[in-house]
Image (cartoon, rainbow, N blue to C red):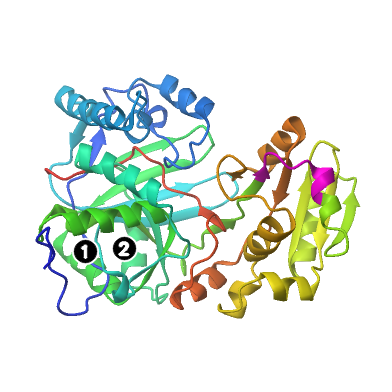
Amino acid sequence: MNSAGHSKATAPRGLELTPFRGLRYDPDRVGSLAAVTSPPYDVVVRPDGLHHLQSADPYNIVRLILPEAGTPAERNAQAAETLRRWRAEGVLTPDPEPGLYVYEQRDGDGLVQRGVIGTLRVSEPEERLVLPHEDVMPHIVADRADLMRATSANLEPLLLTYRGDGSAAGTADLIERTAGRPPLLATTTEDGVHHGLWSVTDPADLAMIRGELSAHQALIADGHHRWATYRRLRAEHPSPGPWDHGLVLLVDTARYPLRVRAIHRLLHDLPVAKALKALDGSFRVRRLDVPLPRAMDALAEAAEQGNAFLLTGDDGAFHLVDRPDPALLDRTVPADRPEAWRTLDATVLHATLLDHVWRVPDDPAHIAYIHDTAATVDKARRDGGTAVLMHPVHEDVVRDLARQGVTMPRKSTSFGPKPASGLVLRVLDL
């Protein structure tokens, strides 16, 4: 037992998903459910995005997940007071009984993703039950921990995936049947995604879900910092207690494959002409005077043969960079990792290009990580930096490396669609 009074589990256990009393917006007290939702906190990266969400509705969830004040302590105190006030006013109200929640996202391109929201027992790393695939930044974990302590709440679920056995009976079938009933809530957000939420409270259904999940591992698809935060808070508090669990969405990717997208880099202080000149002799570089979609097609084709990147900046063209010099890779890529890690585009980008060729430090002053491809291109061409566009990694590669205990360079992948924040919250005093 550690100094906080927490004792570790004495026997190995599987994934344990527990019902909880969700805290949800009263639709009669807000403009619309869509107007109070937000993308996850780390996707709302620009002030204009934050202020857009704040103006959408005075009760938008960003006022809790990204409070604005002069100091971190003031921000967290403000979030706690806002949550207390919204509960007292009945803007946020608890569901009458504990349950798990079936959550559906559906877009206009035919994607349907369904999963189960509940509170998951926070396992130890050595249990190998929840597998990270990226490293975390300690200051972000500390920031999220301060917010969770102040609010005594999990304000948004992280996204975990597992691989079900594909049987007709079981959790997948229950999810399908549940999604055929009238939902607790349904809304369409401004990105065109339709969201639905249903509660599951029948003891037999809950037992079946719990039993099936106990045989599985989960991969963190989105929310590495929140999972690390859950682990920190669990270690700080006596057990058993509410900090033993954290809010998650679990998706069976055997039934509902996630979309895996790349996260692009914007190098603020490196003009594209200088970036290209530094590559002379170490990579093949081809200029492409084509629109963005055709350039991305060329990147995908080149990525099938090996490491490939697409660069653009204020010259208005795309530059396909591939076929790195093998000797350069041997000198710059660490040799103490599996081959699948050593050949990742993100590995070569960071170990070879950023660290060795371009000598760009990996910090916010020099590099921005942007999910949207067109936005990355526009910003590079407008501001004079270099956009490095990436090709996505396949989920199986991510999962296999995670099972080996190997983490990828941070911001290597973007799994989605990500759960909307604001549909269901967990407060620890319920």
Residue type at tag 2 = Leu
- Image height of 360 relative to 175, above or below: above
Where residue 394 appears, as percent x and y from the top left, is 60, 67
- In the rendered view, does 226 fall on the left or right side of 365? left
Marks 2,1: beta carbons within 8 A: yes
Q: Is residue 25 magenta?
A: no
Q: In which quadrant is the C terminus drawn?
A: top left
- Image height of 414 relative to 186, above or below: below
Can residue 52 be seen by looking at this rendering?
yes
At a point 51% along the width and 53% down the height, the residue shown is 416
330 or 195: nearer the viewer: 330
Identify the residue under disc 1: 205
Where residue 365 appears, as percent x and y from the top left, is 58, 39
Where residue 104 appears, as percent x and y from the top left, is 41, 50
Alpha carbon separation for disc pair 2 and 1: 8 Å
106 or 294: nearer the viewer: 294
Where residue 147 appears, as percent x and y from the top left, is 28, 39
Residue type at tag 1 = Asp
At a point 37% along the width and 33% down the height, the residue shown is 66
Can residue 156 be seen by looking at this rendering?
no
Q: Of helix, strand and loop, which one carries label 2?
A: helix
Q: Which mark is residue 174?
A: 2
- In the rendered view, does 51 fall on the left or right side of 340? left
Q: Residues within 10 Å of mark 2 (few under 14, many from 20)?
A: some
In which quadrant of the rendered view does residue 15 lie? bottom left
- Tell me where the magenta segment starts and ends, as one range: 266-275
Specify which label sits upstream in the sequence, 2 or 1.
Answer: 2
395 or 340: nearer the viewer: 340
Q: In which quadrant is the N terminus drawn?
A: bottom left
Q: Of helix, strand and loop, which one carries label 1?
A: helix
